[in-house]
Each structure stands twice: as C-alpha cells, then as structure tokens.
Image: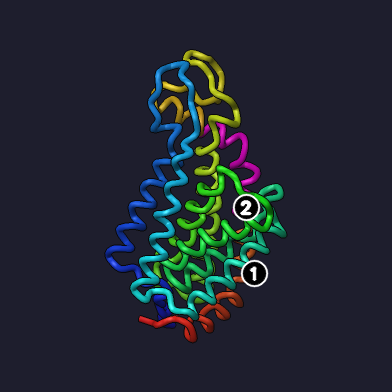
Amino acid sequence: MSAPTRTAAVRLSLRSSLVLAVASLVGLMMLCWPLLLRVPPGARVDPPFLFLALLPLVIAVVLAEISEGGLDPRVLAVLGVLSAVNAVLRALSPGLAGVELAFFLLILAGRVFGPGFGFVLGCTSLFASALLTAGVGPWLPFQMVVSAWVGMGAGLLPRRPTGRAEIALLAGYGVVAAYAFGLLMNLSGWPFVLGIELPGHEGSLSYVPGAPVLENLHRFLIYTLLTSTGGWDTVRAVTNAVAIVVLGPAVLTTLRRAARRAVVRR
C-alpha cells in the first residue's frame, strides 16, 4: 500500500516558515523561563507576561499564508469546523483527571492536512475552547503554543506507514505529545504552584531564584514526576492512544475525503 498523499492545506513559504520558527523559539524560551531567568537570590520573580507578545507572531503566520493564497476559503471552512469541534470536545472533557478529547483530533488533522494547518489548528482550537469554557487567563498563550506544536509535529511524522502501522505511529505520538504537553505546562507555572524558596532550603521541590540550572531542573523533574506524570499526564496519554486506535481509522478516512475536496494535493 502506498503512503498517504501529502496535502498542502497551509503551504509554508520561506517567509512564513521563518516566522513560525521564530515564534516557536520565543515560545520555547518563555515556557522554559524558570530555567533561563537569572535573578539575584531573594529578588522578586514575576511571570513573563511579555509572552503575550508571541500572539502577534502566531497571527502573522496566518496572515502571511492568507496574503500568499495559502488558505483557500474551503480550507478556512475546514479549519473553522475542526476548531469548533475541538472546542466542544475539550468542553465536554475539561481535563478532568487528565481525560481530554481535544488532542486526538488535533493529531489526526495535523497528520492529514500537514504541519502548517496543524500549527494553526492548535492555536485556534485552544483559543476557541478557552472562550467557550471561560478559561481565558495567563496560561492560555502557553497552552496555545504547545498545542500548536502538537498539531505541527503530527504533520511532520513520516508518511510511509499506512493502515495499522499508521494508527500505531499516531497512537505512540499521542502518548509522547501528552507527556510533553504536561511537562511544558508544568514548567511554565511551577514556581507559582509550590512557591519560591530561598537558596539553601533543603528538601524542597520549589523554584530557587539564582540557583544553578541543573539544580532547578532536578527539582522540577522530581516535582512533575510526583504530581502529574503518574496521574494527569498518564491518563491524557492513555486517552489519546485509545481515542486514536478506536476512532482514528474512521476519522482519518473522513478527513482525507474532505482534504481531497478542499486542498491542493502534492
């Protein structure tokens, strides 16, 4: 069986690829700010609210594609429908004990429509769900960019696997994406969940301003292992894998049928 046809729902030009790369780099730096921030011991530590400046970069990706004809009206319609469906799925399963149904559709859509579409869908899905569930807050930009990476990563997976091998690949990716999402979201808020400790405080898992990077990283990894990896993140990973295995074949067929009608193939 031949590899699935690659589609070009959002054709990434050199310009938009550069904007996307810069946005991702800035996003990664802001997510890792507890490890990168260097402040004197005991100094006041504020969250990086300037991360909101990433949103114009994300919007610029979309505008760049629209200006170059990268987003056909039919593709916009598919994007709107999938964003709405994902928002409803997330509202029906708002992370209760880690059960979230939004990611499996994002992964499948990224697989079918490509990395550019997956990136945009990750942003729009989380933004729409935040409006629907009154979940708008300083954590939203973090959630948007990490979800965008999940969708983009699905579009970058090898095209060769088909049939059961493709489902196994996507299910495995869903597991990895679930743990990565939890890890990065934990890192962005870790200093304010446990509080901030003074240097020399023994036995604490809290963030210590001015401590060596490896010391803070060790504290964080133990913290996330004890608080979410064995619970929330694992349930999210299982949810992703089960949803992809059970619903994946039918959803992929439906999305590929829509792609043939709405997207220029290459």
* Left or right: 208 as drawn, with respect to 104: left
Comparing 46 with 172, the one in front is 46
* Left or right: 67 as drawn, with respect to 244: left
Report which quarter residue 155 is drawn in: bottom left
The residue singled out by tag 2 in the image is 236
Residue type at tag 1: Val
Q: Secondary structure at mark 2?
A: helix
Which residue occupies 64% across, 49% down? 135
Which residue occupies 46% across, 36% down? 48
The extreme bottom residue here reads 261
Q: Is residue 232 visible?
A: yes
Say if 124 sits above or below 211 in the image.
below
Report which quarter residue 189 is drawn in: top right
Total number of numbered discs in the rendering: 2
The x and y percentages for residue 242 are 64, 62
Say if 131 sits above or below 214 in the image.
below
Q: What residue range appears in magenta?
A: 221-238
Q: Distance of mark 2 from mark 1, alpha carbons?
A: 15 Å
Give the quarter of the figure containing the C terminus.
bottom left
Mark 2 or mark 1, earlier in chain: 2
Magenta residues: mostly which secondary structure?
A: helix
Q: Is residue 242 visible?
A: no
Image depth: mark 2 or mark 1 in front: 2
Give the quarter of the figure containing the N terminus.
bottom left
Comparing 103 with 53, the one in front is 53
Comparing 218 with 172, the one in front is 218
The residue singled out by tag 1 in the image is 246
Q: Is residue 225 magenta?
A: yes
The x and y percentages for residue 206 are 54, 25
